[in-house]
Amino acid sequence: MLNLEYMWGLLPVLLSYLPLTLQMATIAMLFALVFACLLAVIRVTRVPLLNGFSLLFISFFRGTPLLVQLFLFYYGLPQLVEALVSINGVTAAILGLTLHFSAYMAESIRAAIVGIDRSQTEAALSIGMTQPQLMRRIILPQATRVATPTLMNYFIDMIKATSLAFTLGVTELMGATQKEASSSFLYLEAFLLVAIIYWVVVELLSWGQRHLEIYLNRAYQR
Amino acid sequence: MISLEAVTKRFGKQNVFADIDLTLERGEIIVIIGPSGTGKSTLLRCINFLERPESGRITVGDVQVDAQRASRSDILKLRRRTAFVFQNYGLFANKTALQNISEGMIVVDKIPKEQAHARAREILERIGLADKSDAYPAALSGGQQQRIGIGRAMAANADVILFDEPTSSLDPQWVGEVLSLMKQLASEQQTMIIVTHEMQFARDVADRVVFMDEGQIIEQAPPEELFTAPKDPRTQRFLRKILAPTGQPLP
């Protein structure tokens, strides 16, 4: 049966790699949010040229597997760009996660922006607001509320996707588990434990998400 | 003071209206009436470029804009001299009643926040909603929302307030409070252009009533004249049809 004693001893070891996992996910999420907002605003306001770029960008990063993109950034691009030869696994993973998830998030944010009723846009313009003021003060705050549940889903997905960084030689939560398992041969125990760790982290986040949504909905209570 | 000269608006190849002229003096109140789909709302929306007219010249106070050459900054200037009240209120759903009124003062007029809020509180007092200052639009009745919409227009300190069917989407029980707020503004010499189907209100408040049909201004006159002795047969037909069910005297 399960070697519980081994699992108990392994727990602090694996937990010590959790910060790196969360760090990669958080940094990638922040960059992805900013980038996705830019892409979404470009798509909604149809900025010439940039709009075409956004479409191509979203199409590529949604159309190819994350793992392929990570390999491209880590192993492929240095062949092309001299400066990237020294790119480390963590940076490549953050870059890949950022671009990949921003493509998905841009579409959610765009849908949320388009969903804000047109009369508020006209009202803001009628009092003399400029497009950027309208976006910043009226549209984006409301789109944030609409998009939050979906964006939180992406963040959860992102945390789990950091496990792919181990294929770039990064010893994060998954990489550490892999190493421990192959030296102890207790695969079931090690991978079960890491599954539980991911699960608990995601549950904690979901709990936070519920509170965030209540806060964001405060303007809409009758 | 406010003038439209030869304003023309097309949707695609179809003319909504062509060569519309209209002028009004400071403090004057004009009510535009006419059948649905004759371009009344579109005309109103052209005045602040929510719809861009194809040609013509629009003057509000010291701002003059030629539609064919209007730049972004021309349009912004024009919008700062006008205010607009929408049929479906258009309140900012993420802002409280107070913030809806102060938003323009803070963002557009760059008035310090404290001062803008103080001014917004005065306006809330005047529109009778001082107790709702922290309420969000979702928690307000239609009538209250529209009064906030009017309050927001008042805060813009505009040369003219444009009303686009301000009571048309209200439940009947809320129409009275909105009309009486508009009457209050009228008594304070606020310049207004109002598109409405409220004929009694037009009678009571307008200095001049403009009848539009099929993209043209058919006739305009003071209310007692237009309602009792309209010259054009189209005006007569329209007024008979719309006044008959209300029990108001027919022309």
Image (cartoon, rainbow, N blue to C red):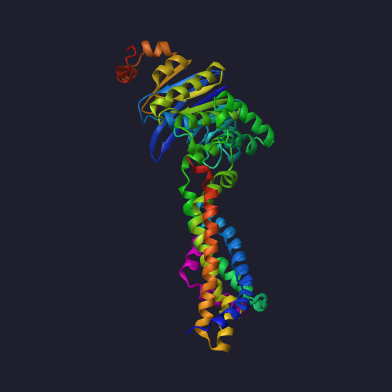
Classify B207 as above or below B107. above
Residue plotted at (56% across, 69% down): A97
Q: Between residues A181 and A110, which one lies in front from this camera angle?
A: A181
Classify A115 as above or below B134. below
Residue plotted at (52% across, 31% down): B149
Q: Percent x, y for residue A103?
A: 51, 63
Q: Percent x, y for residue B134?
A: 57, 36
Q: Between residues B44 and B63, which one lies in front from this camera angle?
A: B44
Classify A152 as above or below A68. above
Query: Total of numbered circles in the picture?
Result: 0
Magenta stretch mostly in which secondary structure? Answer: helix
Q: Percent x, y for residue B220?
A: 43, 17
Image quadrant of residue B142? top left
B92 is within the stretch colored magenta: no
For the C terminus of chain B, give its image quadrant. Answer: top left
Q: Percent x, y for residue A100?
A: 53, 67
Q: Is residue A130 in view?
A: yes
Q: Between residues A61 and A207, which one lies in front from this camera angle?
A: A207
Q: Is residue A168 in view?
A: no
Bounds of the magenta span? A53-79
Image quadrant of residue B237? top left
For the N terminus of chain B, give its image quadrant. Answer: top right
Q: Between residues A74 and B69, which one lies in front from this camera angle?
A: A74
A76 is within the stretch colored magenta: yes
